Amino acid sequence: MVEEQHVLAVTRVMKILEYLAENGASNLSLMAKDISIHKSTLYRFLSTLTSLGYVYKDNEKESYALTQKMNRFVNSSTKYSLLQEFAIPVMGSLSAQTKETIHLATMEKEKIHYIYKIESTQSLRVVTSSHSGGDAPVYCTGLGKSLLSQRGEKEMMELVKKLDFIPHTHSTIVEPEALLTELRKVKLEGFAIDDEEHEEGIYCIAAPIKTKGGEAIAAVSITGPAFRMKQNKGEYITLLKEKIKEIEKHIG
């Protein structure tokens, strides 16, 4: 009997994941009807998957969707693998033009997840702690702030309230209201700055990659020594935005 219950639970979880993978963001009532699971039971499963980081609940739209964490378990036909396919060549071009470190990352709850990294070819370059497959906080990285800024106002405020602010450097923003003010500015300007907020001496410029529907699914950054990045800031912002548009043409 216990074994049968476990099998039923696994079957239901897989039905939920398959449904979200095929249909995208969905509300509770529609999901319950389509996969024949009672709403209260479905809610419990979704709550567990949300707490584990595999499902994201959009409180404003009252919908559920798979998170980018699921990318670690799906095959090469997913949009995130396609994202890499189109983004990496453009990142290579950005690297060749700036000779600085280039990152591609997604956002998972309060963390950014590095997907790909191209090291700087400058003779004088910084050594960063980032690496493909690694994580970093959203509140003190350009990548994190660029992605967090694209959430709806209510969702953004809720996420910021949940953050555990740790002062990584003397420049780290550790006040929720100060971060919200910066995020609103980032959203308007279309790019974010990490001015030695995560690691001393390291400056980063980042911008989000959006689908045609306006969903920010990843971000790209240019990273280098603070003194050199500030000298080239205007040029790099323009260049980064141009490269982001190239990627967005392909991802749909």
Image: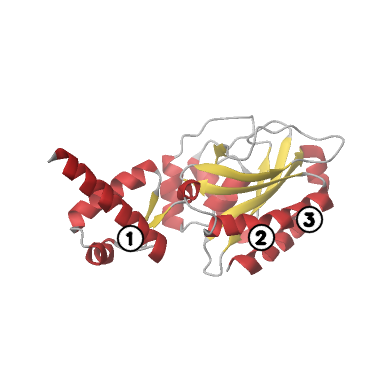
Q: What residue type is disc 1 on?
A: Glu
For this rendering, which residue is in front, 59 or 68?
68
Q: Amino acid at mark 2?
A: Phe
Mark 1: secondary structure = loop
Q: Residues within 10 Å of mark 3 (few under 14, many from 20)?
A: few
In which quarter of the view is residue 2 placed? top left
Query: On the rendered structure, is 222 left or right of 67?
Result: right
Quadrant assignment, res 60: bottom left
Q: Is residue 222 above or below residue 188?
A: above
- For badge 3, the amino acid type reads Ser
Local crowd at mark 2 within 10 Å, few (<14), some, or many (≥20)?
Answer: some
Kind of element beneath mark 3: helix
Picture coordinates of residue 217 (x, y %)?
54, 57
Question: Can you identify the residue that label 1 sits on?
Answer: 62
Rendering coords of residue 34 (x, y %): 26, 66
Image point (78%, 49%), residue name = 95
User: What residue does disc 2 label?
Assistant: 86
Residue at coordinates 23% horizontally, 62% vertically from top-left? Answer: 32
Q: Looking at the image, tell me whether mark 3 or mark 1 is earlier in sequence order.
A: 1
Residue drawn 21% across the image and 42% down it: 6
Residue that badge 3 annotates:
93
For marks 2 and 1, give the one nearer the viewer: 2
Which comes sooner in the sequence, label 2 or label 1? 1
The reply to whether callout 3 and callout 1 are in contact (CB within 8 Å) is: no
